[in-house]
Amino acid sequence: MYKTINAVQLHVSLEEIEPRIWRRLVLPSLWNLEQLHLVVQAAFNWWNYHLHEFGIGGLRYGDIDLLTEDAFDDEPRVFDFRKVRLRDFEEGSLFN
């Protein structure tokens, strides 16, 4: 019997920092990547002062208008991070 996924658990860690700094997040599976971005900001006590994007499975996700504003024609396409949900990714997917 198929069961709907209600929540996802994410392990978020900062690279190139010692000692290792990380957070475990349990979020509704229906949340999109924009909501994930806001939660990561809050989890690390950041203030959303920088441009951001998610790289997942070789694809780019983010705010299309901001990320393509000064982009060159040969840069990879950016997918709207408001239109993809956490449940759309397979277990074990790496986000960067």
Image (cartoon, rainbow, N blue to C red):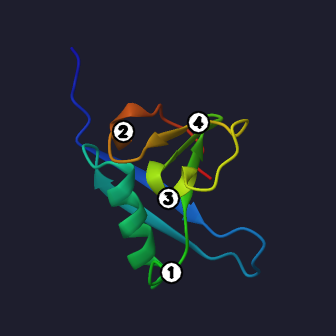
Task: Give the structural element (helix, strand or loop) at label 2.
Answer: loop
Question: In the image, what residue occupies the spot 73% across and 81% down?
Answer: 19
Please tell me how crowded label 1 is: few (under 14), some (14-19), or many (20+) other residues with Cα within 10 Å: few
Q: Position of residue 60 (x, y in %)?
A: 57, 42
Q: What residue is pinned by disc 3?
A: 66
Task: Give the structural element (helix, strand or loop) at label 1.
Answer: loop
Q: Position of residue 13 (x, y in %)?
A: 61, 66
Going by the numbered disc 4, the residue's amino acid type is Arg
Q: What residue is pinned by disc 1?
A: 49
Q: What residue is pinned by disc 2?
A: 84
Going by the numbered disc 1, the residue's amino acid type is Tyr
Q: State how far apart marks 2 and 4 are (Cα).
A: 15 Å
2 or 1: tag closer to the N-terminus: 1
Q: State how far apart marks 2 and 3 are (Cα).
A: 17 Å
* Badge nearest the viewer, 1 or 3: 3
Please tell me how crowded label 4 is: few (under 14), some (14-19), or many (20+) other residues with Cα within 10 Å: some
Q: What residue is pinned by disc 4?
A: 77
Task: Give the structural element (helix, strand or loop) at label 3.
Answer: helix
2 or 4: tag closer to the N-terminus: 4
